[in-house]
Each structure stands twice: as C-alpha cells, then as structure tokens.
C-alpha cells in the first residue's frame, strides 16, 4: 500500500536532523538517528521528496539512471521546516497576519442583515442612518467584531450543516 511508504516519525527524524544543522546542510553531521539506518531507499526517498514538496527541506535526493537515490548529506531545512519543528509556528505565525479588507459589498451585507432583522422599522432606520454616518475605521472595527462573533459560532454552523446533510 502506498500509505505504508509515508512515515510521520521518519519525516520528523529527517526534519529534526536538518533543523539541527540549520542553516547548513546535513553534510556536516556525523550521526543520523538509528531510525534512518535500515529504511529501504524507496521509502526514504518518498519521505524526503514529500518533505521537499511541502517546502520543509531542500535537497536530500538525486535523480540517477536507475531512478532516485537518497543523498542524506545534502538535506537542508528551510525556514518553514525550522518553524514547523519549533512547534509554535515560529516567525511565520507572527509574520503571516491575515488582512481583512472591508469592501462596499461587505457594508451592503450588513445593511441587508439589518433590513431582514426582526427589529421595528424605526429601529432599522436608526441603525442604517448611524451606519452610513460612521467613519471608515469604526465600520472596519464593527466588521471585524462581526467576523469574530461569526467564527465563535463555527461549531454551531458545523452542527447545522451536519443536520442539513443528514436531513437532505
């Protein structure tokens, strides 16, 4: 089976050795974990290539006439690999901030939500008038708070979806 070829512990061992050598390649290390010693080449190569394709390491294999062979001394951890091994997301977690842009369509959705609410017509008019007068930063803050409140109810949405799927 193909899934027997992919081994999370093996991947962790490869990445651990590479991260311990960062920023250099593993060519400088004299010791590899025993878990790498008896691994068949096809399994070792599959896991090295897999880690490469996910951007966690570079190198570690070479194309030859007979196929692909492992080259353990050429493995180098990438910044993503180091961040992964740090278990806290590393700098990527700090630097990869999600930006939410407030577009006119977003405001129109809020207007639509107010219009469809159970509020009295007077209250709806009051809310809509106030919304139109708000400065951009305040409107943005309201949208972000709505997103937070929506995300807080994701489990409810998932339960609703499960119910709909089972009923449908």
Image (cartoon, grey):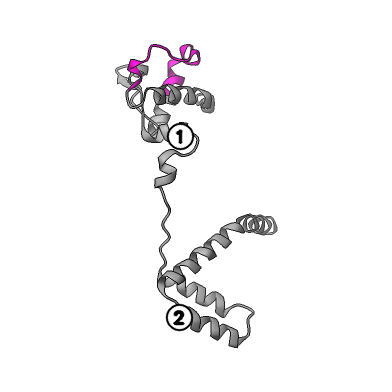
Frontmost residue, 139 versus 147:
139
47 left or right, relative to 126: left
Q: What residue does disc 2 label? A: 132
61 left or right, relative to 107: left
Residue 148 falls in image quadrant: bottom right
Frontmost residue, 43 versus 20:
20
Is residue 117 visible to us here? Answer: yes
| Mark sitting earlier along the chain (1/2) | 1
Q: Which residues fall within the magenta stretch? A: 25-46
Frontmost residue, 36 versus 28:
28
Report the quarter where the C terminus lies.
Answer: bottom right
* Residue 38: in magenta span: yes
Mark 1 crowd level (few <14, some 14–19, many ≥20, 10 Å Cα): some
- From the top left corner, tell me how far across and down residue 62 is, in percent: 31, 21
* Residue 44: in magenta span: yes
Tag count = 2
Q: Secondary structure at mark 2?
A: helix
Q: Residue at x 50, y 24 (%)?
A: 5
Frontmost residue, 77 versus 21:
21
- From the top left corner, tell me how far across and down residue 81 is, in percent: 41, 32
Q: Residue at x 47, y 15 (%)?
A: 33
Q: What residue does disc 1 label? A: 84
Is residue 1 visible to us here? Answer: no
Give the distance between the C-alpha atoms of the residues marked 1 and 2, in whole angstroms. 45 Å
Q: Secondary structure at mark 1?
A: helix
- From the top left corner, tell me how far across and down residue 61 is, in percent: 34, 22
């Amino acid at each position: 089976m193909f899934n027997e070829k992919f081994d999370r512990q093996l991947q962790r061992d490869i990445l651990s050795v590479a991260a311990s050598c960062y920023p250099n390649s593993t060519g400088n290390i004299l010791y590899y974990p025993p878990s790498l010693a008896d691994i068949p080449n096809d399994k070792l190569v599959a896991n090295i290539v897999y880690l490469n394709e996910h951007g966690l390491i570079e190198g570690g294999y070479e194309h030859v006439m007979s196929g692909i062979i492992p080259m353990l001394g050429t493995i180098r951890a990438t910044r993503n690999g180091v961040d992964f091994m740090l278990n806290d997301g590393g700098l990527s977690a700090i630097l990869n901030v999600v930006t939410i842009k407030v577009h006119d369509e977003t405001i129109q959705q809020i207007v639509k939500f107010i219009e469809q609410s159970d509020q009295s017509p007077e209250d709806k008019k009051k809310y809509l008038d106030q919304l139109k007068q708000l400065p951009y930063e305040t409107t943005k803050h309201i949208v972000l708070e709505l997103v937070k409140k929506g995300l807080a109810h994701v489990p409810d949405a998932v339960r609703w979806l499960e119910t709909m799927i089972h009923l449908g």
